[in-house]
């Protein structure tokens, strides 16, 4: 079969649209999105294109009826009424006794009613949440396993296009983190890690949140908690980059004016400098460590003036 020939690139393609009601209810592009989605559902199966639509607002307006008529699989977690039930599973499902309304919101968390996945009219399916939180990363191993399977089947995913025998420059972790934060004031640590992997999988694939924390700590940055989650602050990144720039070799520290020039060689005073200039001359001695005195007062050495204590 042509699908077994890796060179053709006919591997499955998945298009997932979360909160799809925002798309289909768009005032300007909603109608066009509906038409394209229906065409993709009808024809995509021939080419291995899979469309996933997810919404937390399953109403008669949020998901067009033409879409629900053509989808082959429907999944519903706990819903409140028959409208949401049939909006996700298809028209008439609630009347036929296929009801996600009977699922309990907390007790049955992760359990859903599914139609179209087997020959049975419906199934109860148990799902599992793949953890990607501070200190726990179960997503990266899944991605790594998928990449390994692709490689085993002769479809490796090229991560870089570096020339052979050319060593890539070492990654600048602090600069990369600052780039993926994209100027946002605060970015959740999980989001930073995901963006790093997407940006440079060869360097960051396999990183965990501990690795991210260690990379930040190398430049004196500690993630902080904001609204109950750990975040990286843009101000901390900017300060660390500025501090590192100031410490670059050959760069003067902040506030420095550079090295002072060598003192000029003393010149021999001219002969006329010893001559007294006409007019009254005021001689005062500057206060030094050897000659303490009050500013503005003239100090003299003992017995330096006529009529002193020893003048008799």
Image (spheres, rainbow, N blue to C red):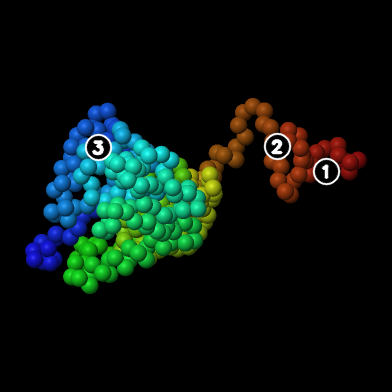
Instruction: Give the residue displayed 37% in from the left and 56% down from the top.
Output: 124
Near-viewer residue (289 or 270): 289
46 on left or right of 210: left
Q: Earlier in the sequence, mark 1 or mark 3?
A: 3
Query: Residue under circle 3?
Result: 65
Residue farthest to the front, as pictured? 96
Q: Earlier in the sequence, mark 1 or mark 2?
A: 2
The secondary element bearing badge 2 is classed as loop
Can you give x and y, in whole percent of width and height, for residue 115 in the image?
Answer: 30, 52
Instruction: Give the residue displayed 19% in from the left and 34% down from the top.
Output: 32
Can you give x and y, in whole percent of width and height, for residue 207 in the image?
Answer: 40, 63
Q: Mark 3 and mark 2: span between their CA atoms?
A: 102 Å
Q: Nearer the viewer, mark 1 or mark 2?
A: 2
Near-viewer residue (50 or 240): 50
Instruction: Give the residue displayed 80% in from the left and 38% down from the top.
Output: 305
Residue 266 visible within the image: no
The secondary element bearing badge 1 is classed as loop
Query: Residue under circle 2?
Result: 284
Q: Nearer the viewer, mark 3 or mark 2?
A: 3
81 on left or right of 265: left
Residue 87 visible within the image: yes
């Amino acid at each position: 079969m042509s699908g077994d020939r890796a060179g053709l690139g006919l591997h499955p393609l998945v298009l997932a649209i979360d909160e799809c009601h925002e798309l289909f209810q768009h005032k300007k592009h909603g109608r066009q999105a509906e038409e394209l989605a229906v065409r993709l559902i009808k024809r995509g199966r021939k080419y291995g294109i899979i469309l996933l639509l997810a919404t937390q607002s399953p109403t008669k307006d949020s998901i067009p009826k033409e879409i629900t008529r053509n989808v082959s699989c429907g999944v519903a977690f706990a819903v409140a009424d028959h409208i949401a039930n049939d909006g996700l599973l298809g028209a008439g499902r609630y009347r036929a006794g296929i009801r996600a309304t009977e699922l309990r919101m907390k007790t049955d968390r992760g359990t859903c009613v599914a139609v179209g996945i087997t020959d049975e009219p419906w199934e109860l399916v148990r799902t599992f949440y793949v953890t990607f939180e501070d200190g726990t990363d179960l997503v990266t191993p899944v991605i790594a396993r998928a990449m390994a399977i692709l490689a085993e089947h002769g479809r490796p995913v090229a991560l870089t296009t570096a020339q052979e025998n050319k060593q890539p420059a070492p990654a600048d972790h602090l600069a990369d983190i600052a780039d993926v934060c994209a100027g946002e004031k605060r970015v959740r640590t999980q989001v930073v890690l995901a963006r790093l992997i997407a940006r440079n999988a060869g360097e960051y694939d396999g990183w965990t949140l501990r690795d991210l924390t260690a990379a930040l700590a190398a430049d004196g940055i500690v993630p902080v908690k904001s609204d109950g989650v750990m975040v990286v602050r843009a101000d901390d990144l900017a300060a660390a980059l500025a501090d590192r720039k100031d410490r670059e070799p050959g760069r003067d520290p902040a506030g420095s004016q550079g090295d002072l020039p060598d003192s000029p060689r003393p010149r021999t005073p001219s002969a006329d400098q010893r001559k007294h200039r006409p007019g009254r001359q005021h001689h005062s001695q500057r206060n030094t460590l050897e000659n303490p005195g009050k500013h503005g007062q003239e100090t003299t050495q003992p017995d330096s003036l006529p009529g002193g204590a020893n003048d008799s």
